[in-house]
Image (cartoon, helix red, strand yellow):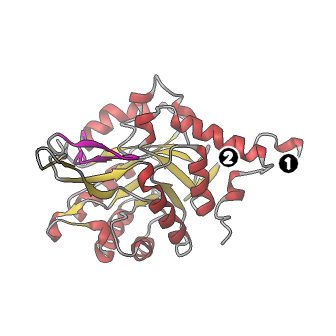
Amino acid sequence: MTDKYKTPDIGINIAGLKFKNPVMTASGTFGYAQEFESLIDLNRLGAIIVKGISLKPEKGNPPPRIVETPCGMLNAIGLENIGLDIFLKEKLPFLMTLSTQIIVNIWGKKVEDYAELAACLDVAKGVAGIEVNISCPNISAGGMAFGIDEKAAYEVVKAVRLKTTKPVIVKLSPNVTDIVKIARSVEYAGADALSLINTITGMAIDIETRRPKLANITGGLSGPAIKPVALRMVWQTAQNASIPIIGVGGIMTAEDALEFLIAGACAIQVGNANFVNPRATIEIIDGITAFLKKNNIEKVTDIIGTLKV
């Protein structure tokens, strides 16, 4: 690296959006960002992906709904949130004061819910893009998650695509036999990028009471425990999809993030780490920069998809 490149370029571009760096917050782990305002400089983040929003407020599941596990945690929050109207009135104004890209994660119980959310957010100032959570139960199909069926995944993403001109990122469920089939399906439906993976379904049991530790019985496993699975799915999908991939799952350090980038991800999301270390995102940004500088690499994009096999 010549003197001209002493400070590496860590900016990226996904679906026409420019990001300062490839580090984003994972939905559901960072609230609506203002909760972290006193802890980190929010303007340094590549993007903030807010807690999942539905059309109407949702109470979520009854407690207990979080359980620590070896190298991770199980959660069965139940997608509790304030609903679209309150988000637009009370949360978005603060987010609009930031220079960081704001992406809104959405979810619904039927295809029409997703379409209506996309239409409303399409005209919302300050919203750079939409992340579609398809790991939700489709009540029109007996509760089967949208994301585990190629046709259902296609239909919900197509409905969103028809209602917005903003970039559409689809968050894929790992609870499938072949994630590549789902990735291709949503790409055909018009997705601009993919986030993978969402949590893995798991459970924990209290041996004294012989009852589930979660009131919901099962929950989503996140944290370092799922990183090898997420990394494999990112690499596998990168070989078969032509749209950008955002890696998520157990990323705690810059080294973790770099693994995902080398595997083919264009960006990463930090989730579970925010609970353990509120400064994790900033440390990862600094760590990526330090790695590039140490190895005389001019741009972060130069290492994306460079895995040697």
Q: Which residues are magenta?
A: 64-82
Helix, strand or loop at mark 1: loop
Name the residue at 68% across, 64% down: 306
Categorize mark 1 by other alpha carbons within 10 Å: few (<14), some (14-19), many (20+). some
Q: Nearer the viewer, residue 26 or 75?
A: 75
**Residue at numbered disc 1:** 1
Task: Give percent across and percent down for residue 235.
Answer: 54, 67
Image: 249 above or below 43: below
- Residue 182 occupies which quadrant of the picture? bottom left
Name the residue at 27% across, 67% down: 146
The image's mark for residue 71 is: none
**Residue at numbered disc 2:** 10
- Residue 5 occupies which quadrant of the picture? top right
Note whether residue 278 is visible.
Answer: yes
User: Image check: 175 left or right of 287?
Assistant: left
Task: Give percent across and percent down for residue 28.
Answer: 35, 44
Indicate the amino acid at tag 1.
Answer: Met
Is 69 inside the magenta-drawn segment?
Answer: yes
Q: Nearer the viewer, residue 267 or 187?
A: 267
User: Image check: 80 left or right of 234?
Assistant: left
Helix, strand or loop at mark 2: loop
Quadrant for the C terminus in the image: bottom right
